[in-house]
Amino acid sequence: MTTVALSRSEKLVSGRLSSWVPWALLAGSFAVAAVVFALANATGDLADFNIAATLFVGMVIYVIVITVISSIVESRRHAMDRLMTALVSTAFVIALLPLVSVLWTVLANGVGRFDPLFFSSSMRNVLGEGGGAVHAVWGTVLITLTATVISVPIGLMTSIYLVEYGRGRLAKAITFFVDVMTGIPSIVAGLFIYAVFALFLRPGISMGFMGALALAVLMIPVVVRGSEELLRIVPNELREASYALGVPKWLTIVKVVLPTAIAGIMTTVMLSIARVIGETAPLLLTAGFTHSLNTDLMNNQMMTLPVFVYNQYMNQGTTPDAAVGRAWAAALTLMVIVMLLNLLARLIAKIFAPKMTGR
């Protein structure tokens, strides 16, 4: 007896839907919802297209269609399974709706000024159209990089102490204060750094290094808590094997423990950077704002992308459309920088992670 493969049309009536059918129904549901909301968009502007409602309505249509078709072609048990799977997928899409909506809004409004002029000029002597945010991009990169250089070694060494050496009341006190620092408002960090510099230097001082210190205060507890948990899950067998070979404890930490947890530590560092790279309030107090390019962290005020967005939106001048366009483009630039930093972190983690070799 020969077995004849069922064609796609035969599978639809054989009591089991083909694997391509749910995906085709999902794509069709999203297409129908997109057409409906595109027709409802009277202005025709890409930024006014309701992407969140499109995804939600598309998932609702998919839930209904897949359940009905499955109940006709398949059994009631399969239809119920399809319904539950579709509902779980809908819950996942609903959870992503705010993120998708923000990404769509920033992309649609910011891509218009995402041009070479925006990344090659500053706002010096610009009152209307034109201008750019090169000074804000440089300020964000330099201040965030400096804050990372300050906070990551401190946070990582603190977590190593808590996991490998810390015992008793001192370790408990450090853990308690780190937890307290995790929840402090960002404006408090900015006020603290400003008060310290105003006390020892002069009132009203602002410079990029102060902004970096304020961001470092916010980053340190995130790095400590994340790295501590990652170091704790490194198997003790690895440490014991290293000790059995006569390797000292500090070298075991450097050569065994840290490389084992490097991927998670890089993710923690990226989370801490993402936590502070969009902060506005502490940078307004410490780094200030300027319309000119300044790459000297120790001298004069520096502009950053979050402050640039705030300044352009709040002080629109004689050409509000141009100012708002620059603000959206700066927000899009900030998101691109975060994405690039995440890719860089993954690459670094892949390079320095321990290599798994088979026999």
Image (cartoon, rainbow, N blue to C red):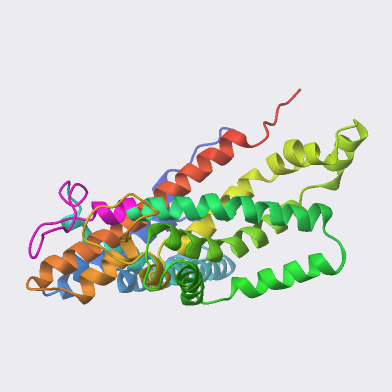
Question: Is residue 97 found left or right of 76 in the rendered image?
Answer: left
Q: How many marks?
A: 0
- 130 part of magenta stretch: yes
Q: Extreme front residue here? A: 201
The image quadrant that residue 27 belongs to is bottom left
Residue 340 percent location from the top left of the image: 40, 47
Q: Extreme right residue here? A: 244
The image quadrant that residue 124 belongs to is bottom left
Please name the residue shown 26% across and 53% down the image: 135
Determine whether 89 is above or below 136 in the image. below
Q: Nearer the viewer, residue 277 or 7?
A: 277
Please name the residue shown 87% across and 66% down the image: 168
Residue 87 percent location from the top left of the image: 50, 71
Q: Is residue 238 visible?
A: yes
First to last magenta residue range:
116-138
Question: Is residue 299 found left or right of 132 in the rendered image?
Answer: right
Q: Main secondary structure of the magenta part?
A: loop
- 52 part of magenta stretch: no
**What is the quadrant of the C terminus in the image?**
top right
Residue 161 percent location from the top left of the image: 77, 55
Q: Extreme top residue here? A: 359
Please name the residue shown 39% across and 53% down the image: 297
Please name the residue shown 86% across and 33% down the image: 247
Question: Is residue 279 found left or right of 115 in the rendered image?
Answer: right
Residue 184 percent location from the top left of the image: 56, 76
